[in-house]
Amino acid sequence: MHFLDQAKIYVKSGGGGPGAVSFRREKYVEYGGPDGGDGGRGGDIVFEAVEGLNTLIDFRYSQHFKAPRGGHGMGKDRTGASAKPLVIKVPVGTQIISDEDQETVLADFTEVGDRVVFLEGGMGGRGNASYKTSTNRAPRQHQPGIPGEEAWVWLRLKLLADVGLVGLPNAGKSTFINAVTNTRAKVGDYAFTTLVPKLGVVRHKGREFVLADIPGLIAGAAEGAGIGDRFLGHIERCRVLIHLIDISGTGDQDPVEAMRIIEEELEAYGAELEDKPRLIALNKLDLADGELADAFADELREAGAEQVFRISGATGAGIEALMDAVLQYLPDRTRTETKGAEREDAPEDEQSGGDWSPI
């Protein structure tokens, strides 16, 4: 299953059924009056957040959704049947965005079972029986029914996670998430090994929280450089961010420069990401000199970093202390489920388009 986090769709609610024009035709009943029934109500367009969906890939192949029309009225004062609503199922974390400005949030689904009637079906038309008066004994007018509403909207998926993982390409994020969760993310000695976001559940000291990893950022990502910053939306709901910095000497930037680049990209993206608490983790400690790591930590603190940790995703060194610090930003209760849905770690192969199932 491919990962897709945004899609444009067309939705239209059902129109109301037309009212009927009918007159009684019964034996031995003289001057039978009007008995045309009203039309039925059209179907609503309903969005519902359900568990078991992790991506918007289904909307790549089906972009038009039209609710059924209400039944037409019939003689003998029979009202047309009201149409059933068309329920569109979306993953938890989905937002409905206006197509006009692509910014206005029309609906936000953060819990399993969230349900919104997005477009209401049209009312059914009146039959001629409803027009009967003392002076108009045989009316022939009726209403055709009110048309349904229609709209183009964008669906945008923002993953629900407690902790976000950011850093430059090849900072060791995939190795780190593999070490702290059961996720089997692809690891490679080249930039942009991670192509799509991943989720994993961390279990630490009797508590659970969800960790989100997004593709690496580079300078100019806000302007579209590299993979760009489109995946930053998946960490907007996080309580704290972990910034991994490579100190093995293989990267092009020193740690202070690496921190500055990520800080600028978070600020350029907006959505208050720059205000979220951040834990700086100097990664690949197994490939660096201990004294050099201490010097880097001091430089980062002088540059404004509040909490700096030295870790190794490969050996696990320092990870426990980092996880202890993460718990300080999370609710005090033990997490047995996430946002109403049980989440399990899942393997992923981005290059081959393998199954992506973080929830």
Image (cartoon, rainbow, N blue to C red):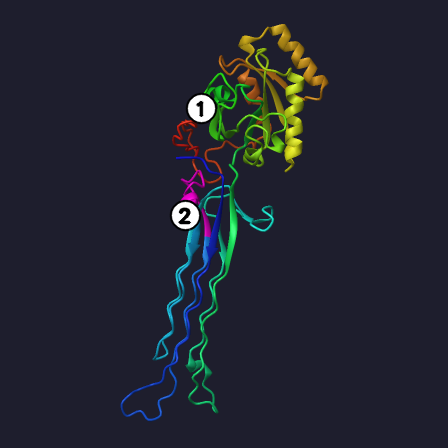
Left or right? Give the position of 161 relative to 344.
Answer: right
Evaluate whether residue 276 shows in this view.
no
Query: Secondary structure beneath disc 2?
Result: loop
Task: Give the amino acid at mark 2.
Answer: Ser
Residue 313 x, y percent position in the rendering = 51, 16
For disc 2, the marked residue is: 62
Q: Quadrant of residue 266?
A: top right
Task: Tell me the quadrant of the picture where the C terminus can be found.
Answer: top left
Left or right? Give the position of 172 relative to 78.
Answer: right
Query: Which of the pair 324/54 is nearer the observer?
Result: 54
What is the number of callouts on the image? 2
Query: Which of the pair 184/262 is nearer the observer?
Result: 262
- 149 in magenta: no
Evaluate whether residue 61 shows in this view.
yes
Q: Residue furthest left?
A: 27
Task: Tell me the quadrant of the picture where the N terminus can be found.
Answer: top left
For disc 1, the marked residue is: 185
Task: Give the amino acid at mark 1.
Answer: Ala
Left or right? Give the position of 52 relative to 226.
Answer: left
Q: Residue at x 41, y 43 (%)?
A: 58
Q: Residue at x 49, y 14 (%)?
A: 314
Residue 202 x, y percent position in the rendering = 48, 26
Of callouts 2 and 1, which one flags the residue occurring earlier in the amino acid sequence? 2
Residue 61 higher or lower than 75, as above or below:
above
Residue 243 higher or lower than 131, as above or below:
above
Residue 246 higher or lower than 21, as above or below:
above
Q: CA distance from mark 2 to mark 1?
A: 30 Å
- Which portion, as a residue range, is magenta? 47-61
